Image (cartoon, rainbow, N blue to C red):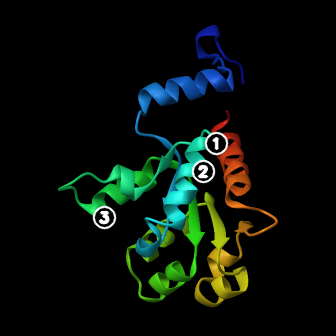
């Protein structure tokens, strides 16, 4: 098969593509932070702060859902506009998943993609496996003494940058 000169396509350098995408999709985020409602002012806020300090753009319900907006609709938009989903697995999230709350819906959407990273904090992957074997089977991180939250956030931000081609 031969191509005429007008059929040839050029490939922009990855950094240039990222710039174009940022202008085309200003609401695009590197990460979607799935968390339990009870963690929004604690561990989830701490992780959000560490991720943004590491240079990642993060969809976090506490900063993205405006007054009077539909929480579920805004979450749906956030999921669609995020490159990678991270699930902050805490004891509160495990309880939320059992109750099939909002975090359970977010998790269902994230598991339908290959873009989800579980982050265990204050719990284990064994405990997660009892509630969500599919999420526990994904490669993830455990925030602990040997991997404190700031270091975990740097690893996650680097993974998100690699995913976006930065």
Which mark, by number, is residue 19?
Answer: none
Give the side of residue 84 with respect to residue 148, left or right: left
Alpha-carbon distance for marks 1 and 3?
Answer: 28 Å
**Residue closest to the eye, 76 or 56:** 56
x then y, percent, for residue 136: 68, 77
- Mark toward the viewer: 1 or 3: 1
Which mark, by number, is residue 54?
Answer: 1
Circle 1 Cα neighbour tier, 10 Å, few/some/many (<14 / 14–19 / ≥20): some
Write down the residue under mark 3: 72
Write down the residue under mark 2: 50
Give the side of residue 71 with respect to residue 48, left or right: left
Q: Earlier in the sequence, mark 2 or mark 3?
A: 2
Q: Residue at x 74, y 53 (%)?
A: 151
x then y, percent, for residue 4: 64, 12
Query: Residues at badges 2 and 1 in contact (C-beta under 8 Å)?
Result: yes
- Name the quadrant of the C terminus: top right
Label 2's element?
helix
Circle 2 Cα neighbour tier, 10 Å, few/some/many (<14 / 14–19 / ≥20): some
x then y, percent, for residue 55: 61, 38
Residue 51 vertical position relative to residue 99 in the rendered view, above or below: above
Snapshot quadrant of residue 138: bottom right
Alpha-carbon distance for marks 2 and 1?
Answer: 6 Å
Q: Residue at x 56, y 82 (%)?
A: 91
């Amino acid at each position: 098969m031969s191509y005429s000169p007008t059929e040839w396509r050029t490939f922009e350098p990855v950094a240039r593509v990222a710039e174009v995408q940022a202008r085309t999709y200003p609401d695009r985020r590197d990460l979607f932070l799935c968390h339990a409602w009870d963690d929004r002012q604690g561990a989830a806020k701490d992780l959000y702060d560490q991720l943004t300090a590491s240079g990642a753009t993060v969809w976090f319900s506490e900063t993205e859902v405006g007054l009077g907006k539909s929480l579920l609709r805004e979450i749906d938009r956030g999921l669609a506009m995020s490159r990678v989903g991270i699930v902050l697995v805490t004891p509160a999230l495990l309880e939320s998943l059992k109750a099939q709350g909002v975090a359970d819906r977010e998790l269902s959407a994230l598991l339908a993609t290959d873009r989800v990273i579980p982050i265990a904090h204050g719990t284990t992957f064994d405990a997660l496996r009892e509630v969500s074997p599919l999420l526990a089977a994904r490669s993830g991180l455990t925030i602990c003494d040997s991997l404190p939250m700031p270091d975990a956030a740097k690893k996650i931000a680097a993974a998100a940058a690699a995913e976006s081609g930065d």
